[in-house]
Image: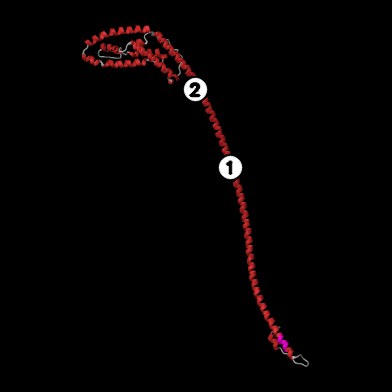
Amino acid sequence: MKISAIDIRKHTFEKIFRGYDPDAVDAFLNSLSQEWERYTSENNLLKMQLEYAEKELAKLKDIETTLFRTLKTAEDASRQIEKEATAAADKRIDESKVRSDEMIAEAEARTNQIIRETEEKLKRFKEEFAAEIKLQERDFRAIENFRDNLVVQLSSLANNTMDTVERFEQKYDKESVLNRMEEIRQHVSEIEIPKKAAYFTAPKEETAAVEPDPIVEEQKNEVVLEIVAPEHPAEEEKEMEPEETVVIPEPAYKAPEPVISEIAIPIENRKKTAAEEANEALEEMHRSAEKARDASPAINRPRTPDTSTPKKNGGGSFFDQI
């Protein structure tokens, strides 16, 4: 039953004999109504506070729920992140291990390849060096053999030259040369007389026409005489014999005046004396001997000892060719 302060004030009691004092009861009711009114107001205030507190509590509960959810989400996210980080770390570690293994294998393969290439280069270098040493040794031996052959050839050439000079000096001594020169002078003096007669009897036009031909023949003979001087003294007499048929090719020459051409050739060839020709031949022999001694190409050719057939002492000599 709900009682208010106004109900307490308006409440009445029945009057009976020997009952309560009405003033005291009224006073008590007034005070009771005041107290009741105070408690009611306090109760309302407390209710209002309670409602406010309940609202705040609801808000706090919502905040708590939100915070819990956030915390839960954060925990889940942290766990997920930690899991992902662990997986990524494990993956990176595995990749690093694989990469390191690959790099180690590649480095080992490259090292082995470099070692093989170095060994091959070293082996090839050793082979080339050994071949070069063998080649140098062979060249050195060839040079030694060439030196020995050169010494033998030089000594053989010197001996042959000395033998040739001695044979020439023995064959053409001074007295025989002087006698031969005297014979040549007499022969020249005998040939000069028909020449004058031929020139007196021959017409001027024919002599003028024939004179250039003996000059050409004279040039040919001079060239042949220069070739007769041997390059190697050891083969002098051997080379003289084939030149004998080339020196005077009179049958091949056909001149309009046979007498004049035959006389003009020896007269033009006798411009030098026999002594001068002999001296020139000796000088040419000495020069050829010195050239053969000094010139290496001539020495480098293989030479054998002079085993040729005996030379003719007859008409193949130097003065017979003149």
Between residue 158 and residue 258, name the one nearer to us.
158
Within the image, what quadrant is residue 162 found in? top left
Between residue 173 and residue 317, name the one nearer to us.
173
Is residue 160 inside the magenta stretch? no
Crowding at dot 2, Cα within 10 Å, few <14 / some 14-19 / many 20+, comes out as: few
Between residue 202 and residue 231, name the one nearer to us.
231
- Residue 72 sits above or below residue 318 on the image: below
* Left or right placement of residue 263 versus residue 65 in this view: left
> Which secondary structure type mostly characterizes the magenta part of the structure?
helix
Q: Identify the residue at image location x=49%, y=20%.
A: 147
Residue type pointed to by label 2: Ile
Q: Identify the residue at image location x=50%, y=20%.
A: 145
Mark 1, residue position: 107
- Residue 78 sits above or below residue 98 on the image: below
Task: Indicate the secondary structure of the residue bearing disc 2.
Answer: helix
Q: Identify the residue at image location x=62%, y=52%.
A: 89
Residue type pointed to by label 1: Ala
